[in-house]
Amino acid sequence: MKGSVFSGARPTGRQHIGNYLGAIQNYVKLQDEYDCIYCIVDIHALTTLEDLSEMQYNIREMMLDWLAAGLDPEKSILFVQSHVPEVTELHTFLSMITPLGWLMRVPTFKEKARQQPHNVNYGLVGYPVLQTADIILYKADAVPVGEDQLPHLELAREIVRRFNHLVAPVFPEPQAKLTTAPMIVGLDGENKMSKSLDNHLELAATAEETEKRIKTAYTDPQRLRKSDPGRPEICNIYSLHGFYDPENLEEIAAQCRAAEIGCVDCKKKLAVALNASMEPFRERRAEFAARTGYVEEVAADGAERARAIARETIREVKEKMCLL
Ligand code: ATP
Ligand code: MG
């Protein structure tokens, strides 16, 4: 029997190269070895309650990115979280066995509470419980994610162990699956590339937008003029060359150290390499976007298939919790 994989991402809109290199490329690869389920977690997006009017647009943009990246609805289940309401039922059951202290210690909770002190809502502290429900509703063994998600996954395993111990051994302990690029640094050269920090490069951006955005990136802060020798090992533009321009990597490092190439030219080279590598993605994306009703069809079919599995898990959980 194949193992099963689950991963979800909040519908924050278009995906960036951090999302791709850290997570989506694994989503694609795992499709052949596992039964894969990928979910756009719209309920999770409600915890930060900003412009909700963008929700449906963002869900569609994200699904288009996933399809263009190679997620195949013939192989995998692609769906939207709220279309399978069983997840909220499991979330409620899990919340009865999850100690509040565990949740209050989660680093992302503390961070969000700092970022939105006017809106430290009940859903925010329960975020990892809902995330656990997402994963175990499908009894997933493996969860492809970026490094920033590891604390959440550790907590999911703790919740599973507690459920299995206190109620009945129903769920496997989900394991994280990292790519070889589990943490891509953003254009600020400092923080994790992230949509909310606006330091990202969108997969679906045009070639011109990409070049323009790369121009704004921070490089070696000690290199003030082109004639100063650079330090590729601390430059994020150089590290991105490693993913998009690996053949020329040694040459770029040597030219940078010898001050033969300036940061402006180095960025231009990166833009050319990145755009060349993204071109087939961008073409496929435009094709999917032009097919009227296609994204909606994929999501509806995915929800139906996901729901059949979810119903079965909920039945089992209710039985073990003496609710039937
Ligand atoms: P937000 O800023 O709203 O949190 P994000 O840009 O961090 O958005 P998410 O939707 O939180 O993106 O992440 C989706 C997936 O991509 C997760 O598995 C996450 O671990 C991974 N990921 C996000 N950013 C990076 C990054 N910079 N490097 C590697 N993986 C990443
Ligand atoms: Mg994030």
Image (spheres, rainbow, N blue to C red):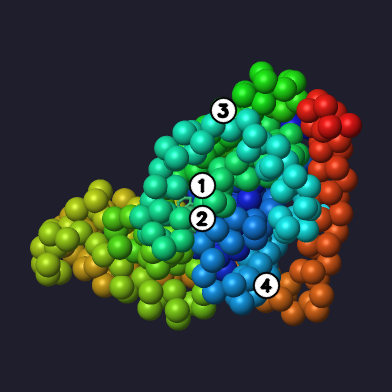
Query: Label 2: which residue?
Result: 121
Q: Earlier in the sequence, mark 1 or mark 4?
A: 4
Q: Do the residues bearing badges 2 and 1 touch, measured as CB atoms within 8 Å? A: yes
Q: Residue at x 21, y 68 (%)?
A: 262
What residue did someone put label 4 on?
56
Mark 4, other Cα within 10 Å: few <14 / some 14–19 / many ≥20: few
Tell me the number on the disc at residue 58. Answer: none
Above or below — where is 20 with respect to 323?
A: below
The residue lying at 54 percent from left, 66 percent from top is 49
In front: label 1 or label 4: 1
Location of residue 35 in the rendering, given as x and y in whole percent from the top left corner:
77, 40
Sequence-wise first label, 4 or 3: 4
Q: Please state, as top left, top right, bottom left or bottom right, where the N terminus lies in the image.
A: top right
- Residue nearer the viewer, 194 or 137: 137
Instruction: Tell me if residue 39 comes above or below residue 206 in the rendering.
Output: above
In this figure, which residue is indicated by the disc labeled 3? 158
Figure label count: 4
Which residue has dot 1 on it? 125
Residue 118 is situated, as x and y percent measured from the top left of the image, at 41, 63
Badge 4 or badge 2: first in the primary sequence: 4
Per the model, the C-alpha gap separating discs 3 and 2 is: 23 Å
Q: Is residue 33 above or below residue 184?
A: above
Element type where label 1 sits in the image = helix
Are the residues tagged 1 and 4 within 8 Å (C-beta)? no
Disc 3 + disc 1, Cβ < 8 Å: no
* Residue located 39% across and 59% down the image: 117
Look at discs 3 and 2 and give the one toward the viewer. Answer: 2
At label 3, counting other C-alpha atoms closer than 10 Å, the crowd grade (few under 14, some 14-19, many 20 or more) is some
Dot 4 amino acid type? Gln
